[in-house]
Image: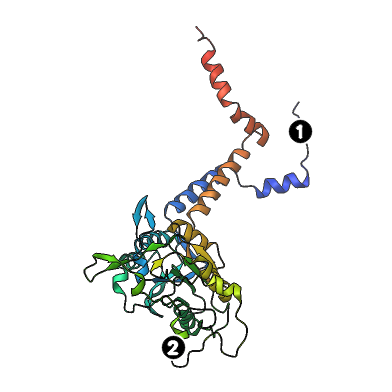
């Protein structure tokens, strides 16, 4: 006498109708893995970053207070090494440009371009950055930062400025005669990246052939703010921080880190760079290595959302694994029975080996 199967519930009938067969899921997994191997790309909207890296190439960049793989190195060498690492660590779709700073001006070598497609060109340019390319002996950092912010504000507000410097103004500035930022803080986003050690170090004097011919001495370097002595500004229409009067903050004076009598020595003026960053609504980071720098930059606010070619291999592989799991689920065993079956597999193998062979 044949027994009839119990009637199925509505949910069971719906699951049976919608759930593909075991063979279909296995075939689907094979097809997905084949597509993943072809590494397809489709444009997807993604948050992307755009950076303009500006490197200080003033004479203090010759100072040897950094290390590369445990070996002493100059600040310029450390910047080249770290910046190459940082470019390699930026994800595809990120745009990066390159510029150099000396005097109070910035020269843009590369407008921001996609890093993966143009990595070799960017890395080659970074490898040639050297204080030997200096075109002015001064290092008026605040003016240089303000100028490049104006350049981005007029042309590309999506790009973030990454200004790499030791923060040492040469000649030094006082709180009363500081350059005044005339733009809108926060209109251009950016980072000030400090390079160097906090301890004072002598600045090597380098000749035209790149050889060290001594160090800079006290009488060879301006030790005080020359504006207080009546020197004209770099630009005829430039305004100073004391225009319109007002009391100068003692805290600001201390954070400028001017050190008359020791300006021929160099150090990372971190307190001063943090002051500038606060006034401009920038972020501040200290240069340790390129990997950390890239992670901090990418971890910040994205510049824009763009359609970026995106590989689908990982997603297709995950779907293939899901199909395989569902195929086992569609076998004769319930999910928990199937899980217990495979978890007990080592025990069954041991029992099979320990069982005496039958004659």
Q: How many marks?
A: 2
Q: Residue at x 32, y 70 (%)?
A: 131
Relative horizontal placement of residue 89, taking residue 44 as reference (left or right): left
Q: Position of residue 228 (x, y in %)?
A: 47, 85
Relative horizontal placement of residue 305, taking residue 75 as reference (left or right): right
SS assignment at label 1: loop
Residue placed under numbered mark 1 in the picture: 4
Q: Is residue 118 visible?
A: no
Q: Residue at x 60, y 89 (%)?
A: 245
Give the mark nearest the N terminus, 1 or 2. Answer: 1
Q: Using the image, determine if residue 137 lies above or below residue 33.
A: below
Q: Position of residue 31 (x, y in %)?
A: 48, 50
Residue placed under numbered mark 2 in the picture: 233
**Front-lying residue, 107 or 195:** 195
Alpha carbon separation for disc pair 1 and 2: 100 Å
Most distant residue in the left direction: 209
Most distant residue in the bottom direction: 236
Relative horizontal placement of residue 85, taking residue 292 as reference (left or right): left
Q: Residue at x 44, y 67 (%)?
A: 166
Q: Position of residue 104 (x, y in %)?
A: 41, 80
């Amino acid at each position: 006498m044949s027994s009839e199967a119990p009637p199925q519930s509505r949910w069971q009938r719906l699951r049976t109708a919608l759930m593909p067969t075991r063979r279909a899921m296995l075939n689907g997994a094979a097809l997905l893995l084949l597509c993943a191997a072809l590494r397809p790309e489709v444009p997807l909207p993604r948050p992307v970053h755009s950076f303009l890296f500006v490197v200080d190439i003033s004479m203090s960049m010759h100072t040897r207070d950094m290390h590369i793989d445990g070996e002493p190195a100059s600040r310029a060498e450390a910047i080249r090494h770290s910046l190459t690492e940082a470019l390699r660590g930026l994800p595809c779709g990120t745009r990066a440009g390159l510029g150099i700073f000396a005097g109070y001006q910035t020269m843009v070598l590369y407008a921001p371009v996609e890093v993966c497609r143009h990595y070799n060109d960017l890395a080659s340019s970074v490898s040639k950055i050297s204080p030997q390319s200096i075109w002015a002996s001064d290092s008026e950092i605040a003016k240089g930062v303000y100028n490049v912010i104006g350049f981005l504000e007029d042309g590309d507000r999506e790009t973030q400025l990454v200004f790499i410097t030791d923060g040492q103004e040469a000649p030094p500035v006082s709180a009363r005669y500081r350059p005044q930022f005339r733009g809108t803080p926060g209109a251009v986003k950016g980072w000030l990246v400090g390079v160097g050690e906090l301890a004072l170090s002598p600045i090597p004097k380098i000749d035209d052939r790149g050889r060290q011919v001594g160090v800079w001495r006290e009488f060879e370097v301006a030790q005080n703010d020359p504006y207080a002595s009546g020197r004209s500004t770099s630009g005829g229409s430039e305004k100073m921080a004391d225009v319109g009067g007002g009391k100068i903050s003692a805290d600001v004076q201390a954070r400028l880190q001017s050190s008359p009598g020791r300006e021929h020595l160099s150090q990372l003026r971190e307190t001063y760079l943090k002051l500038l960053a606060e006034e401009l609504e920038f972020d501040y980071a200290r240069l340790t290595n390129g990997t950390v720098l890239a992670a901090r930059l990418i971890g910040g606010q994205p510049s824009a959302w763009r359609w970026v070619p995106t590989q689908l291999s990982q997603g297709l592989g995950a779907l293939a694994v899901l199909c395989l799991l569902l195929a086992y689920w569609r076998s004769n065993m319930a999910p928990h029975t199937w899980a217990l079956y495979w978890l007990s597999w080592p025990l069954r193998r041991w029992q099979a080996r320990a069982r005496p062979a039958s004659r």
